[in-house]
Image: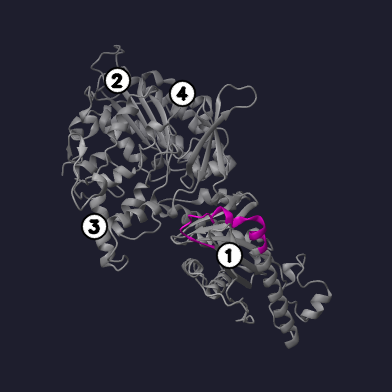
Amino acid sequence: MEVKPPYKIDGKPKAIAGEIPRDVVANPMLPLPISVEEFVKIVNNGQLYVDKTGIIHDLLNYRNKYVFLFRPRRFGKSLLLSTVEAILLGRKELFTDLAIGNTNPEYQFKSSHVIRFSMASFGNKPEYLEKNLVEYLEFFARNKYGLQLTSSSIGGSLFQLITLLYDSYDSIPLGKSPDLIGRTADIPEVVVLVDECDYQLLPNMHDPIKLQATVDFLSDFYSGLKSVSGMIRHLIVTGITKFKVFYQSSSNFISDISLDPAFSSICGFTKDEIRSNFWKHIEYALMKRKDLNIAENSLTGENLYASIEDWYDGYTWDGVTDIFNPISLMEFLSNYRLKQYWYGTGDSGTIKEFLKSDADYFNIFSDNNTIESDESTGMLTEITPYAVLFKTGYLTIKQISSSKSLGGGDGDVITYHLSIPNREVRQSLAKQIIFSRFFVLKHGVMKNDLYSRFSDFCGYFSERDEINSQHTLVSIFSSYSYKLHTHAESYYKTLIFTALCFSSGEVTAEASVGGGDIDLSLELPSDIMVIEVKYNHFPGPVAGKNDAELQKAGAVGSTSASADSITPDQSLTKKGKADRKKNILRLLDKGINDAFSQIESKGYAKKYTYPDQKKNVWLVAVSIVGRDDAEIKFRKALIPSGWSLVRSYPGTSLKHQLVRSARKESDVRA
């Protein structure tokens, strides 16, 4: 099936009444090219291709012919290079109805010698890299051009092949050396495309010996390309990140266009591209969701589009142009369920390693992360965990600012303010944090059981169901190994945050206000939760001692008691158990009161309680004692007269179905 652009009248999309909003018309519902990364196959199979050839035309006319582009995995980099390959092979017939086939002046589809490297096909063991690539070049030269290469090194093989192609006609007899006849207009030029250039770097990042061997090899590889750069018409390199190997002299002839606004949408889909190419697929997905009883009959295509946007949009490489994750979007349009697709498409081991080494991982979920770039060089000045998360797609640019560089430099320092792009990534990152350094599940507890508890907690919490929220939170505590328990408030704050990442709302950590930083906030369609977490350590009883003895020894309520001395409650007397319950309740009460007092004294709610606020603002106190007891209380902030609090309504704490005495408040739950 021929790929057609949207039907237009006078250069504007024709509106189809009742189908597409905002006067945007959808393409026919062509099959989706899921996991198809070859442009020629997409066209020949009659599958949907979102036209990127206009931007590719700009890329081929860029001031530097040697460029690098980073984008996260599965974001369309391989499809981009296969499209470039088809253009530079002179396959004009494939582009008749696409932008590059209708340029003015007309684009000249001149055939070139294209050498394309997919680095993932060569494995990640540094000891075999050179051998594998040399054998590939020998096979490519022999089978495509009848050339015989004699060098055993990667640099030598590249030099031989590119020199022979540059200085020869299309075909040279096997084993013969070409006559160096000089260039003519009819002799094809040489193009080199390198896909997944950092494929070997990422798995070896935490093995210094293998990493150095990999860096040495890649330096030789790019040195070989640099030595013949004058013979190369285009060199286009893609990957996830350049890392330090690209800052070395072997590859400093390559321009980084990754954050150039002109190429911000070269991979992935913009909002306009979604509406003009996928709208019929969205309407069909809505119909299937209704058939599967996972969508209400009253929902419209616009409602579903908003949900898709929440889950899969939000990437930006210029701080302006929003980009949808292409693989997640197409997987959803084929499976009809909003869930994490991108997370399961590749190895996340490297990110887990970085999370393990980042002591400040809680801040990953805040909007306070920044990385810097010197505008004069276009290179990242540091490879921090946040920079790695940005390059790999877990963080994206939300704002760009600039300032003069220090130390007498003349260049501007560009600061990129980062945040998590969408719900899919937020949940994926939360899962990785949970199992990289947060949880070792108890025997018999499955990951899906834990995810179910997170989901239940979010549901109860969003509905302000105090009792079930508390019970579910403690069940989450009880699902991980006791050896990982730490007596730190930040530990539980992070746990609650990661749990709320599975909610339908927008969760934020440590939002700054005049009086300090709010622990957590959760914004739902009708409600905003301002959350303060308080933790008090209460050591469990030591075998053979009751609470009176522990209290006499200074253990009850102490934060210095060793967790290793704690054993299950097996030998307490009846009075000892009663005393213990009393102390737990006292500490739970203290935590609730301290939390509400801090919210009030610091004015945390003022951020949200302005006169025209349409949402209910709830102040939430979370009190945790040890790891077996928790209490959650909700109070409603009054709007708009400044801000004040209504009294809390009744709730209960946890621990073996401990029931609090009834409170005297008579507030009715809103």
Which residue is more in the foreground, 141 or 431?
431
Which residue is more in the foreground, 440 or 464?
464
Give me the disc on residue 284: 3
Q: Specify whether residue 58 is in view.
A: yes
Name the residue carrying label 2: 176
Residue ID at (51%, 61%) = 500
Which residue type carries mark 2? Answer: Lys
Return the residue found at the far front. Answer: 641
Q: Is residue 457 above or below residue 24?
A: below
Q: Secondary structure at mark 3?
A: helix
Give me the disc on residue 620: 1
Give me the disc on residue 253: 4
User: Could you tell me if the residues under marks 4 and 2 are in contact, i.e. CB atoms within 8 Å?
Assistant: no
Indicate the position of residue 277 as horizontal and vertical percent values: 25, 45
Distance from disc 4 to disc 2, alpha carbons, whole Å, reads 32 Å
Is residue 599 on the magenta stretch? yes
Indicate the position of residue 523 as horizontal and vertical percent values: 49, 58
